[in-house]
Structures are given as structure tokens and as C-alpha cells.
Amino acid sequence: MKIRFIELDINGDERGNLIAIEGLKDIPFEIKRIYYIFNLKRNAPRGFHVHKKLQQVAICIKGSCKFLLDNGKEKVRDIILDRPNKGLFIDKMIWREMYDFSEDCILLVLANDYYDENDYIRDYGEFLKTIKV
Ligand code: T46
């Protein structure tokens, strides 16, 4: 399974750094929602679902964490996000797990649609059944 990283440009000068993210330019969709996950525990993994339609880009803007991505046929473990200019594209129908959060981790996620609990499949067996249909 191909893992798609998105390298973001850093605008840096003697004052510090700035990263801008523009929908359909820096990432492959229009951004409809942004959320961030923080105050995390290393031993409290998250995710464990797929989205039927939603596409997202995850960026660890502070600290680090790891992702597992799984298309139902192949799993890629220990994908490290550890810098604010490295995005991970997560397509629809990809099972994701996040773990090994550093204490200072802030995970920013850009999404191409609004929050909709009906878009989630949170059961791994149901995910496998869905992709086999
Ligand atoms: C994903 C991974 C990377 C909302 O009310 N609005 C929102 O936009 C989101 C994302 C969540 N919520 C509520 C739903 C739950 O009651 O926040 C609570 C925690 O959500 P969840 O358990 O789904 O969080 P994670 O970290 O397991 O998953 C999240 C996203 O939900 C998911 O889309 O791909 O981050």
C-alpha cells in the first residue's frame, strides 16, 4: 500500500517559521473542517475506524505520534509524524490507528467534510465485509 506524505513549505526567517495550507493547492481537497487532538497519553491509542467517504490530512504540529494504515489487504505500521511540515494523506476506506503519542503531541487534522458519525465504520469485521462487496 502506498503511503502518501505531503511536504509543506516552511516560510522561515529570523523571527521563526510559518506554514500555510491552502485547500486544493497544498492538499488535494477543499478544507471543510479542522480539528486537533492534544493532551494525549502514550498508552491510549485512538482511531480504530474507517471513513466511508471522508478524506483527511493529519499533521503532527508539535511532538510526535505514529499511525497504522490498513486498506483491508495490507497494513503499514509505525508511520511516524514528527514535524509540522509533514502531512499524511488518509483516504476514505482506510482503517487508521494512532498511538505512541509524545507528551507534547498536538495532532492537527484537515478534513474535506463536516463531522458525521454515519460516515464511520468502527468495527473491523464490518470494514472487511464492506470492501469485499
Ligand atoms: C479520524 C482520526 C484521525 C466531534 O464531535 N467532531 C469531530 O469533528 C470529531 C473528529 C470528533 N467529534 C467527537 C466524537 C467523539 O465523541 O469527539 C469525540 C472523539 O472522537 P473519536 O473517538 O472519533 O476520536 P479519534 O481520535 O479516535 O478519531 C479522530 C476522528 O474522529 C477521525 O475522523 O480519522 O481522529
Image (cartoon, grey):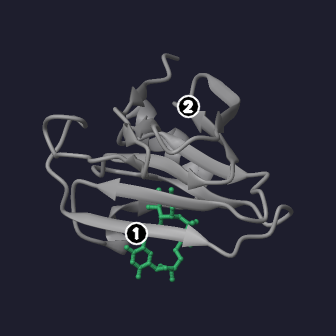
Q: Is residue 62 above or below residue 29?
A: below
Label 2, ligand 1: CB separation under 8 Å? no
Front residue of this view, candidates 2 and 39: 39
Residue 56, how many percent across, how many down?
35, 48
How far from the left and from the top, in percent, is residue 78?
Answer: 73, 33
Q: With 129 as the anchor, is 47 left or right in this view? A: right
Sequence-first disc among 1 and 2: 1
For marks 1 and 2, give the one nearer the viewer. Answer: 1
Number of labels in the image equals 2
Residue 15 place in picture, x, y as percent = 42, 52
Say what amino acid the circle numbered 1 marks: Tyr
Residue 31 image position (x, y, % from top left) = 19, 55
Q: SS of the residue at dot 1?
A: strand
- Mark number displayed over residue 108: none
- According to the picture, the residue beneath numbered tag 2 turns out to be 72
- Name the quadrant containing residue 24: top left
State left or right for residue 129 relative to residue 21: right
Residue under label 1: 35
Farthest top residue in view: 2
Residue at x-position 65% and y-position 26%: 76
Instruction: Give how far apart the Cα atoms at labels 1 and 2 are.
Output: 26 Å
Type of amino acid under label 2: Gly
Q: Residue at x 68, y 53 (%)?
A: 63
**Is the residue indicated by label 1 positioned so its CB lies within 8 Å of ligand 1?**
yes
Image quadrant where residue 73 sits: top right
Q: Residues within 10 Å of mark 1 (few under 14, many from 20)?
A: few
